[in-house]
Each structure stands twice: as C-alpha cells, then as structure tokens.
Image (cartoon, rainbow, N blue to C red):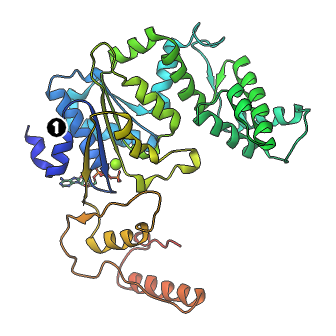
Amino acid sequence: MSYLATLNDEQRAAVVAPLGPVLVRAGAGSGKTRVLTYRIAYLIERSARPDSILAVTFTNKAASELRTRLKTLLGKAGRGVAAGTFHAICAKILRTNIGGRIGNYTANFTIYAGDEQLQIVQSALDAYTGSVPQIMEAPEMLGHISRFKSRMQAPTVARRTASDPVQQYAAAIYRSYQKTLERANALDFDDMIGLTYRLLFEHPDVLDAVQSRWHHVLVDEYQDTDAAQYALLELLTRPVAGRARSLFAVGDAQQSIYGFRNADYTIINRFTRDFSAATVVELATNYRSRQEILDAAYAVIRHSRAVPPMVLRASRRAPPVPALVIHEAADDRAEAEEIAKSVGALLAAGRRARDVAVLY
Ligand SMILES: Nc1ncnc2c1ncn2[C@@H]1O[C@H](COP(=O)(O)OP(=O)(O)OP(=O)(O)O)[C@@H](O)[C@H]1O
Ligand SMILES: [Mg+2]
C-alpha cells in the first residue's frame, strides 16, 4: 500500500473508492492519469486479475502514455492489463466476433480511412440523381455522415429523422456510402464503435464473453467520448447476473478539444444521472503550473457557460520571478513589437529559442 502515500487526500479517495461507477472530475495537471493507473494497481492488489482490467482512452497518444505509465508503476504485475484506444479495443472485439453475426462481414474486414472514405463519398455524390439542395464537397458530406454515426443513427433512421432537405440529402448519400462499405467488407472508424455496440447489443453471447473477460473498465480523457462510445461503455459495464458495474472514468470538461469530432462534454454531467450510486471525486490540486497561471486561466474559462469551471490550487510554492506579465499594447503592430522585444531579451539572457513559444 506504500504507493498510496504518494497521493494527496483527494487522489487517494478516488483510488480506493468502492467498486462501482466512479467519476473523477478534475482540472488539468491534477493527477488524473496518475489516479487511474494507481486505481489499476489497487484493483490488482485487491486480487483482480490483470487480464480482467480494461483501460481505454480516445487518442493513440493518450493510450501510449497510459501503457508507459502502467509499465513504470506495475512492471510485470501489470502484464495482461488491456490498455488501448476505443478503436483498437473495438477492432479486437470485432475481429473475433463479427463473422456470421453482422451482415456479410467477415473477420478479415478492412478499415477505410481518409482518402478511401472520401472516394466513396465522391462516387455516391456523383451517382446521386435526386435534387441537390446545396452543393457539398466530399469532406463536408463525410462530416454529416460521421455525425449520424456518432449519434448512432443507421441510414434508415437518419432518413426518417431528417428535418430539412440538406439532412435528407446527407442521409441518402450516407445510405449509399454504407452500402459500398458493406459490399467491400470494410468499416470506417465510426463503424468500429457503432458495430461493436450492435454486436454486443444484439448478441448476448458476445456481451457475456466480453463482460466475463473484462470486469473492470477504466477511461482516461473521459470528456472526449462521444455518444456512441458512451453507449458502448454503458453496455460493456452494464450489471448482469449480479455483477457490479466497475467503471472508473476520469475527465475534465474544460479540456474537451474534440467537439469537432462529436465529443460530447455533457457526458461528464450525465454520469451521476445515468449511473446510480456513483462516487464522484474532484481533484483540484494542480501539479504543473504556478498559482498565477491557474488564476489567469480561470479568469478566462470562468465565462464558460457550458461547464462550471473548477478553481484549481497550485501545489508549487510562489515563484521567485513573476510567472505572468500582462502587457497592453496600442495596436497589433505595437503588440508584435513588444513580443519581438521580449523574445530578444530572453535570448540575450541566454534562453534557448526552443524554450520560447508564441501563441496568438
Ligand atoms: N500527489 C502528487 N504528488 C506529486 N506529483 C504529482 C501528484 N499527482 C500528480 N503529480 C504530478 O503532476 C503531473 C500531472 O499528473 P497527471 O499527468 O497524472 O495529470 P493529469 O490530470 O492526467 O494531466 P492532463 O490534464 O495533462 O491529462 C505529473 O508529473 C505527476 O507526476
Ligand atoms: Mg492525463
């Protein structure tokens, strides 16, 4: 239990929270990933088998950070823990189970991305014979298709619920796009989530097999999940046959940067409503930045109407030099000159150019 001593009180409360749904709401740099990896160590110590633990996140970068940190913390004891992106985990589930269960898909399906998707959309646009309410390039149309999918709408549902001619047009192209994919035994990234959900939902034997394998599901960067991934998590951890829902999610609504990819930060607020008896822990100590920086960041985000921001306190002591200087310039030219002058002064004082960044 010695590792628990390196956590602050809030972090420790999250790590040792009772089994069940646990939401860790926290700010940037407050130790969310640390808490998640320690929770895994705690579960193993409490005799969970490593291969009964699944840790998922949204991006490859976050997934590889998670794997590295698990290795450092657990070494051999962590062997068998599954840690990966939603898409990687879903690809595994699909390869093993999709054959003979969904349409004509087989285990060696192909994954289409980028240009391949755009080509299919373009062919569907070219072949469309109905009236076109608005000229749309393939990338924009693909955005519509991806939105339908992230809301888990099949082409028929998309067509039925289309509220205007543009939506109807998009739903028609979606239908043709999807047909081409299925004929080619191909999935796109959105399908990997959507079809995994369908597979688990429509085939209780598969759900049972997957649930029997992974009793504990942990999610890092939870604010970046979209509606489809949320539905999948709910299903994966749905209590059946007396099992408890062991779902541990850590996230920060202020850091949701995947809105353009249909991520839905309101999912954080739905957690306690949807999962009864959830434990919620807030982490408000920041280990990365000085208090001045945190206060300045808060002054900006406190105007967010979408999510009430969290006030963070820094664990670091006051700096010997001011961490933040605000300079008001008369116009953008004067602003640029001031920045150039400050950078020049830093370089003259011996700072390396690679340590300086300009954001605007
Ligand atoms: N209790 C603690 N004592 C000392 N250092 C800590 C503590 N908790 C976290 N840290 C350090 O703070 C840094 C941020 O931790 P971590 O990456 O886990 O935070 P995070 O909330 O996941 O960050 P992000 O918002 O970037 O995802 C790390 O360097 C970590 O080692
Ligand atoms: Mg993190």
Which residue is pictured at 47% across the width and 62% down the height? 305
Which residue is pictured at 57% across the width and 9% down the height? 101
Which residue is pictured at 40% across the width and 39% down the height? 63
Q: Amino acid at mark 1?
A: Val
**Rendered location of residue 334, percent (x, y):** 55, 91
Q: Which residue is mark 1?
A: 16
Q: Nearer the viewer, residue 173 or 162?
A: 162
Which residue is pictured at 44% across the width and 73% down the height? 353
Q: Is residue 116 left or right of residue 147?
A: right
Q: Is residue 135 left or right of residue 36?
A: right
**Rendered location of residue 322, percent (x, y):** 29, 82
- In this rendering, the answer to whether 144 lies above or below 120 is below
Q: Is residue 247 left or right of residue 179?
A: left
- In this rendering, the answer to whether 327 lies above or below 162 is below
Q: Nearer the viewer, residue 352 or 19?
A: 19
SS class of the residue under badge 1?
Answer: loop
**Rendered location of residue 199, percent (x, y):** 52, 17
